[in-house]
């Protein structure tokens, strides 16, 4: 497998984070948080996002790793100056921090990535 390079100009913003108690959640992680992200391509390269990886770590140091192809079932192709916005959600049992990255490929075949800024999910007190 080829190495991934962080592409200057490809970056992610966390646009909104919201506790959404009405969403499905397993009993051991009963607090769903919807997150709204935008991938911005301010580089000179056209990039197709092929996958993502998340690491969600709770205050006790327990981590859940989520990896997969695409972004919400899509493989967005971002030309220079284009953005791709989407939302999804994580479920937590205790206060947690999410970090991650998106992985892509340029039209020239270079494997690239961009980091997702960390964000903290803390369930409201009952």
Image (spheres, rainbow, N blue to C red):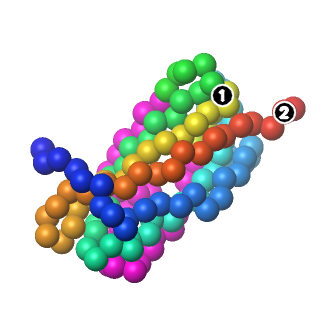
Q: Which residues are magenta?
A: 64-89
Q: Which residue is mark 2?
A: 125
Furthest residue in direction right, as rendered: 126
Residue 107 among magenta residues = no
Residue 126 in view of the camera: yes
Residue shown at 51% from the left, 50% from the top: 117
Secondary structure of the residue carrying tag 1 is loop
What residue is rendered at 28% in x and 66% in y? 48
Rendered location of residue 9, percent (x, y):
37, 68
For disc 1, the marked residue is: 93
- Judge from the rendering whether residue 53 lies leftward or rightward of residue 23; answer left or right: left
Q: Quadrant of the C terminus?
A: top right
Picture coordinates of residue 65 (x, y %)? 43, 33
In the rendered image, the vertical position of residue 101 relative to residue 12, given as above or below? above
**Residue furthest front in the image:** 8
Query: Residue 20 or 38: which is nearer the viewer?
Result: 38
Q: Residues within 10 Å of mark 1 (few under 14, many from 20)?
A: some
| Disc 2 to disc 1: CB gap under 8 Å | no
């Amino acid at each position: 497998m080829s190495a991934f390079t962080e592409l200057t100009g490809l970056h992610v913003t966390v646009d909104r984070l919201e506790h959404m108690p009405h969403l499905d959640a397993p009993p051991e992680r009963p607090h769903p948080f919807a997150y709204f992200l935008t991938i911005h391509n301010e580089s000179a390269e056209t990039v197709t996002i092929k996958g993502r990886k998340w690491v969600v770590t709770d205050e006790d140091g327990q981590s859940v790793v989520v990896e997969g192809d695409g972004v919400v079932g899509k493989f967005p192709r971002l030309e220079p100056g284009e953005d791709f916005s989407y939302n999804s959600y994580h479920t937590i049992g205790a206060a947690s921090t999410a970090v991650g990255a998106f992985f892509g490929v340029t039209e020239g075949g270079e494997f690239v990535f961009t980091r997702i800024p960390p964000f903290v999910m803390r369930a409201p007190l009952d």
